[in-house]
Amino acid sequence: MEPKVLLINPSFNLESHFGRLAKAGPSLLPVGSTYLAAVLEAGGITVSIWDGQVEPAGLDSLEEELREFRPTVVGITAYSPMLAQVRAVARLSHSILPDCSVLVGGVHATVLPDEMLDMEEIDVVVRGEAEPIIVSLIESLTNGGEIHTISGVSIRRNGSHHHAPPIPMIENLDSVPKPSLHLLKHHLYRPAPEITMTNPSKIQSIITSRGCPYQCIFCSARLLSGRRYRYHSPKRVIEEIEQVIRDYDAREIVFLDDNFIVNKNRVYRICDDLIESGISKRLIWACNGRVDEVDQDMLFRMREAGCRLISFGVESGVKRLLNLIKKDITLQDSIQAVTWAKRAGIRVRTTLIIGLPTETVQETKQTIEFAKNLGSDFAKFSLATPYPGTELCEIAETRGLMKSHDWSRASSMAGFSSYEPLFTPEGRTGEEMKRWQRRAMREFYMRPRQLWNVLSQTKSLADVRLLFEAARAMIR
C-alpha cells in the first residue's frame, strides 16, 4: 500500500486559554510540521497538513480532509494544554478510517509517553526529534512492518508499554530538507500585534537553531530539542530567507529560535550575508535573545542587517527569584541590554513571569515596576506554569503546590481565562495571581507613552481591531 500521511496541529481554544484576550491572540505557522513534511516528501511519501488553529470549521473541516485525503497514517502534535483536542482528533481519525495508524509527537508525548499510550485512540508515540526515523516508521506502519525496534518509538506490546531507545539528536541540521511551506494556507495566519511591523500577509517564520544550553527551570522547549545548541549554517539561513522572499513575497521574518544569538560569530556572519546580499534593504526581522549575550556592537550590526524587534526574557525584577529559576542574569544585564537595543534603533519586547515559587506580594510589585521602568516597547507578563518534565513542575509537585493535573489548564495567560491556574506560590491564591497578571498588563500598557508606541505601529484596520480588543480586555 502507498503510504500517505496527514500531519495535524489540533485546534487551540483561544477563548478558554486567553479569555477576553482571545480576539487579539496570534496564530503561528506550524513550522515544525513543515520540517517533518519535507523529510516525508524527500522520502517519496505523500503528505498533507491540517492546522486546527486556522480552520474555522474545526473538526468538520478535519472530517472532510480525512475522507478526501484518506491517509494511512495520521500524525498529531501534542502540546500539554491541548490533550483533549489530541484525543478528539485521534478518535475522529479512527472512526472515519479504522485501518489508519494514529501517532503523536511533540514535547508532551516525549515527556509523558505512558500517559499518551493510556489513550486507546493513540497507536504510537514518537519521543524526541522525529526527522531521522519518520520515513521508516511511516513505511512500517503502512505495510505492517515491525516498529518496536525503531528509535524513539513507544507502543503497547505484550500487554505493557514498550519504549525503544531514544532517537539520537540530529548533529547536522543542514541535513534536514528545507520546510515544506507550500502545504500551509498562509493567508489564514495572524501574527502577534507587537511583532507585526509590516503587512501581516508579508510575514514568514523560520527556525534556524534547536536546543538551549541554559537551565531555566520553567522551560519545556529543551525537553524535545536538547540542551546542546545546534544550528543551521549562515548559508542555509540565507537560502531559506531567499526562498520565502521568492515564493511568498516575504517582507518580514520572525526567527522562532528560543535563542537566536547563542553563537555570536554565527549572528555576525548572518548579518554580514544579509547586508552584502542586499536582503537587508528589502526585508526586516525579529528574534529572541538573552540579555547577557548581546552587546552594543552586535545590536548595531543586527539593526543594519534588518533587525527591528528583539524579545528578551527578563523574567523577574527580583534577583533572588532570578537565582531561584536559574536564569543566570542580573537586573543590570536587562537594563543594559534594553538600553543598547533602543540606542541601536531596535524595538524591544520583554517577557516576565509572576507567581514564581516563594514569590511575595512585594516581589510581584517589584517585577511590574521593573518592567515599567526598563523602557521596552512591549511586555508580556505570564503566570508561572509548571509544564510536565520541567524543574518547576518537580518543585510544584514536591511542595504540594499543584492545584490539578488537568493539563488543559496549563496556560501562562490564565489571568484572562475562566479557570484557576495549575500552580500558585506558597500562601497565595489562584484568583489573586490572576488579578496581578491583569493588573500588570494594565499598568504597563495604559500609560500614554506605551499607548503611543502601540498605536504608532498599526499597519492595517485588522491591527486596529486587534489592539482595540486587547485594550478592552485589559480595561475590563
Image: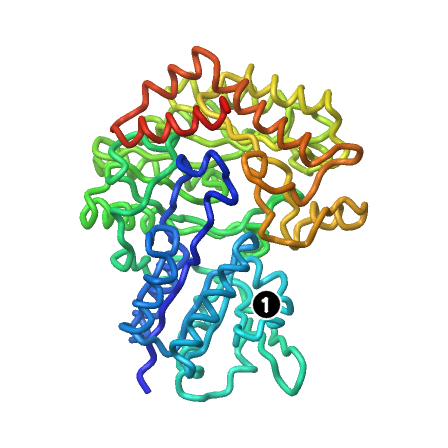
Specify the amino acid type for callout 1. Met
Residue 215 pos. (x, y %): 65, 44
**Image: 105 above or below 368:** below
Circle 1 — which element? helix
Residue 433 pos. (x, y %): 66, 31
Quarter-of-image position of residue 374? top right
Counting the numbered discs, the total is 1
Q: Nearer the viewer, residue 287 or 90?
A: 90
Q: Nearer the viewer, residue 304 or 158?
A: 158
**Image: 18 above or below 291:** below
Quarter-of-image position of residue 254? top left
Residue 197 pos. (x, y %): 31, 29
Q: Nearer the viewer, residue 329 or 441?
A: 441
Mark 1, residue position:
116
- Image quarter in which the N terminus is found: bottom left
Residue 285 pos. (x, y %): 33, 35
- Callout 1 environment at 10 Å: few (<14), some (14 to 19), or many (20+)? many
